[in-house]
Amino acid sequence: MFMTVMTTVCNLQARAQVRPDQTLQVESSFVTPIDGQSDRIVGGAVRGGNLFHSFQEFNVGEGRGVFFANPTGISNILSRVTGSNSSNILGQLGVLGDANLWLLNPNGFLFGPNTDLQLAGSFYASTADEIELGEQGVFSAIEPGQSQLLSVSPAASFFEQAAQQSGSIINEGNLMVDELQSVGLVGDSLIQTGSIVAPGGSVTLVANQVDLADGARVEASNFGQRDAGTVRIQASDYVLLEGENTRVASAVLPGTQGNAGVVEVVANSLTVKNGAFLSASTFGRGNAGTVKIQAVESVLLEGLDSQGRGSRAASVVGPVGQGNAGAVNIKTQSLVLKDGAQLSANAFGEGNAGTVTVRASESVLFEGEDGNQTPEGPTPSGATVTSETTSDEQGNPGEVNITTQSLVLRNGAILSASTNGGRDAGTVKIYANESVLFEGEDSLGRASRAAAARASDTSGRGNAGEVELETKSLILKDGAFLSASTFGRGNAGTVRVIANESILFEGLNNLAGSGVVSENNSRGQGNAGEVNVKTQSLVLKDGAQLSASTFGEGNAGTIFIEASTLSVVDGSKISSLTGSNSSAGAITIFVEDEISLSGENSLISVGAEEGTNGVGGNIEVSADTLTLEDQAAISASSEGEADSGNITLNLHNLLKASNSSITTSASQATGGTIGITATNTIRLDNSNILTDVRGTGDGGNIALSAGKYIIAFGDSDILAFSQDGRGGNIELNTPIFIGESFTFTPNIVNFTNLDGNGRVDINASGEISAGIITTPDNSTIEESLTELPDNLVDTNDLLANSCIVRTNNAQGNFIITGSDSLRARPGHPAAPSLPTGTVQTIPTNKNTAPVHGNPPWQIGDPIIEPESVYRLPDGKLVISRECSK
């Protein structure tokens, strides 16, 4: 495209330099020489403060100069080209005074590599057909005879006619004006490889297409002690920035003082590639400005330059800067950052971090590197959106705000409002109406993440910030995570997640756990924070985690989960642990339907690690059904000198545990209590409920309450040990307790002596004294359950073929026991019902002996109701009735 415009629009053949036309009649322009290399333009039509010139051709040759005379009282010099050729400005172009210069040529402009503007005022060039002068005046290049020349300033409507342009503007040179002045270019297409500089002033580019490439520079930065200016680019089609050092900037430069300005792009689409950037930053003394991007369809930032610097939009405080970061605001339909691209409102110097705000009506994609290798090795290039601070000085945190339908972070992409210095981290807020997906790592193993963390500089005292995420569906996988952790002296922050439908946290081969963390790292001195998750379906798998732990000197945090279903499988964990002398946190879970824990190391856990004085935390769970299987566990422990925490499970239906455990433990202090309430049933299958104290502290109490049954099969144990203290109390509050091979096992205070014996043990032993064990009074089955024989009884053998005549000899008694059995006599009420659970069909067995013979009755025979069971003289029992007298 560039070469096409060069050859068709900007023919570089020799042309007449300046040739006035006669359209202004007696007010026509004249060219007079200044010296052998320069010409002066005089004459023209004066209307108030406006001076009008008209030319058939207007060019400035290489090494030559053209200067407009500036009569007294003239503030605007307006020149048009009525011929059919574009204007080639290859040398010096200027005004001999302070007036602004306006050029109009519908055929286009070429500003060559040696173009030099010699102006005290502003410079404007347009390929429009005409310039409007208020509501009635017009200065036309295609219909010069219809012009109405007025004294009205052309500035009001000059930039409103981009869609009507036909010619292109190419700038290969350096278009620079004095401080506080402006440059404006309006064309069908603008192609720039050179520079446009308006120190402290304004630059406005308006076209259908805008291409900036090969180090092109559009800048309104400050010089000296003034504020920077404004850069605005408006395109009805696209804006493209491409290549190393290509930039659009309004910055505060090093060694200067003042505030940065505004960089604004309004287009149908914006693409920033290969290290190009937009900047409203400060590197001197003053605040950063604002980068505003509004693209109807799409915004794409991608790629690195040769120095490894990513394409970016930034409003930052540089390392030697003193001031506050500004804002980066993007509004579009679709936003993509990839391969090292960045959005940044960081404060690397002294000052506050800024704000990055993205509003994308459809989708946002932040994608890291694609895994390609360079000859020097992998190039880390995760896309980043940051509002971070590094200075130890006081200041405010920044924010990252994303609002969209669908958000994807991939291959190590980062959203961060973190701090490395002495100040607080900021806030990351994500609102996605449909879905959020974080997945993948970069080549250095760094996962995709959203963080408002207090980073690794242990000299800093700042606190971590907050991460807020709200969507319909959230997926974090391949080690991706949300973090409000602290690695320094400050406190961890809060992570709040709301997903109206579902959340999936999926780890990476049990090695990198995706999930949510608000932790105090081992070098930190602050408290862990809060993790708050609310959804319909929550799944943690393959080592995923929710953690509010502390491994430094502070307290662990809290985890709160509200869901309809919760599944923790394949080594995933929900934990609030302390590795210090501070307290462990608390885990509170409210689930409407079922909680399922499955797989080795699948845990819900609170506790204090060995060598600490931290108090163990508590676990509180409320659900309809809780299922544990395949070595899953719920635990509250204290491996240090403090008491263990407690576990409370409130179940509206039942607890099912298979090859799993629910435990509290303490090494040197009092054990925690376990309280389980199930409206229906508690069922243990090779599973343990254990409070274990391995020191002098008293054992924890166990209270199990079930509305119907407590059932224990296989090697299931209910134990409240204390190795050197008093055993805990065990209470089974239920109508029926069924224990397979059940036995009380006193005077054993070591779990390993009871584990693996193939029976159900209940033990509350302690070195000083045993605890109290309370079981149901009259419905405990203390011996082994007995299997029923496979052979079926022939009912014909139980029926007498005739009535029975009693003898007068007393033979014994028939006692009816149990419930739901025979009536004492016909007409008597039945015994009260004792529930026995769901009735199931006895499975067919090939070895079962068939019922022999044909029954002596046929369908339709009258039914004679028996009265009792009678013992015959041979001892056989039959069912019959007495003969009538």
Image: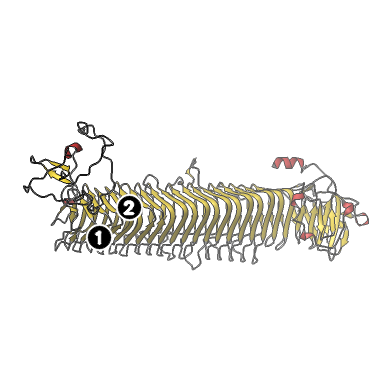
Looking at the rendered image, the quarter that the C terminus falls into is: top left
Q: CA distance from mark 2 to mark 1?
A: 21 Å
Nearer to me, 596 or 147:
596
Q: Which mark is residue 834?
A: none
Extreme left residue here? 809
Q: Which mark is residue 703?
A: 1
Q: Residue at x 58, y 46 (%)?
A: 274
Q: Quadrant of residue 223?
A: bottom right
Callout 2 environment at 10 Å: few (<14), some (14 to 19), or many (20+)? many
Question: Tag 2: residue type?
Answer: Leu
Is 656 situated above or below 119? above
Which x, y percent locates residue 134? 81, 61
Residue under the point 51% across and 66% down: 396
Work out whether residue 237 or residue 117 is closer to the camera in this orientation and state it.
237
Place residue 47 in its image quadrant: bottom right
Q: What's the residue type where badge 1 is placed?
A: Ala
Q: Would residue 862 appear left or right of 378 to someone viewing this image? A: left
Expressed as whole percent of the image width and height from the top left, the position of residue 584 reads 32, 62
| Left or right placement of residue 720 versus residue 623 in this view | left
Q: Is residue 741 toward the left or the right of residue 399 in the image? A: left
Q: Is residue 250 visible?
A: yes
Task: Please name the residue that numbered disc 2 is placed on.
Answer: 603
Q: Confirm or deny contact between disc 2 and disc 1 (CB under 8 A).
A: no
Residue 757 rendering spot, x and y as whole percentages: 17, 47
Coloring basis for residues: secondary structure
